């Protein structure tokens, strides 16, 4: 952009223009030079795929490193950062749900009747423990969010945190930045 174009974009709309109106041919030429669209449709789709690939790679490295500037929109912001740190600093029963479900599944497919019954009871007990743990974590997270961010929009942050507890700590993305026991 030239200095003249910058002036025209930042000027007051009620103020006089201060320059002559460009000829139609000049305006069309300016518009055509600004947009660089390939003439070949295949080339355009290839460029779009390359742009998307680099964007996804940037987001993936940000998820692995915790770089706040390149995170996807669902993980950006200081509220989400606080929720991640809050969840990562605590033990939760829900993060052991997947390994526990595998054990229960193996017990349930055995031909021994009492082991099948035991696996059903164990699954129900663990399910109740996970729900109670969700309630405990949810209440304390809601309280912490209200104290730390009284005037900010925290919509969706509670569900974001509860879904994060379902993932095993080592598989969470963005990677945990706090150790267990540290408080955010």
Image (spheres, rainbow, N blue to C red):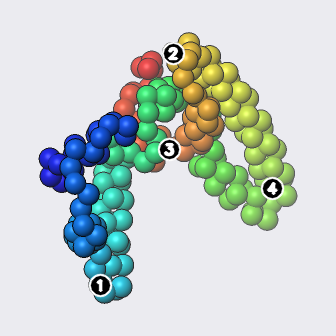
CA neighbours of label 2 inside 10 A, class few (<14), some (14 to 19), many (20+) = few
The front one of 24 and 69 is: 24
Q: Which secondary structure, mark 1?
A: loop
Residue 89 percent location from the top left of the image: 47, 26
- Residue ID at (61%, 49%): 98
Mark 4 element type: helix
Residue 148 image label: 2
Residue 35 figure quarter: bottom left
Q: Position of residue 40 (x, y in %)?
A: 31, 87
Pointer 4: residues within 10 angstroms few (<14), some, or many (20+)? some
Q: Earlier in the sequence, mark 1 or mark 4?
A: 1
Most extreme residue toward the left, as rendered?
3
| Secondary structure at numbered mark 2 | helix
The residue identified by callout 1 is: 39
Q: Which residue is mark 4?
A: 116
Instruction: Verify CB contact (< 8 Å) between mark 1 and mark 3.
Output: no
CA distance for labels 2 and 4: 47 Å
């Amino acid at each position: 952009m030239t200095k003249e174009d910058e002036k025209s974009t930042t000027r007051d709309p009620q103020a006089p223009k201060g320059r002559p109106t460009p000829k139609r041919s000049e305006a069309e030429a300016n518009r055509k030079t600004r947009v660089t669209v390939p003439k070949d449709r295949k080339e355009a789709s290839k460029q779009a795929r390359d742009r998307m690939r680099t964007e996804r790679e940037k987001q993936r490295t940000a998820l692995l490193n915790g770089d706040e500037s390149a995170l996807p929109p669902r993980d950006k912001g200081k509220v989400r950062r606080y929720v991640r740190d809050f969840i990562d600093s605590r033990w939760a029963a829900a993060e052991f749900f997947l390994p526990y479900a595998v054990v229960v599944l193996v017990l349930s497919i055995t031909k021994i009747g009492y082991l099948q019954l035991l696996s059903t009871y164990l699954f129900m007990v663990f399910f109740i423990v996970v729900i109670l743990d969700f309630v405990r974590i949810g209440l304390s997270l809601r309280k912490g969010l209200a104290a730390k961010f009284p005037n900010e929009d925290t919509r969706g942050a509670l569900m974001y945190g509860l879904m994060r507890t379902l993932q095993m700590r080592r598989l969470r993305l963005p990677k945990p930045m706090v150790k267990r026991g540290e408080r955010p």
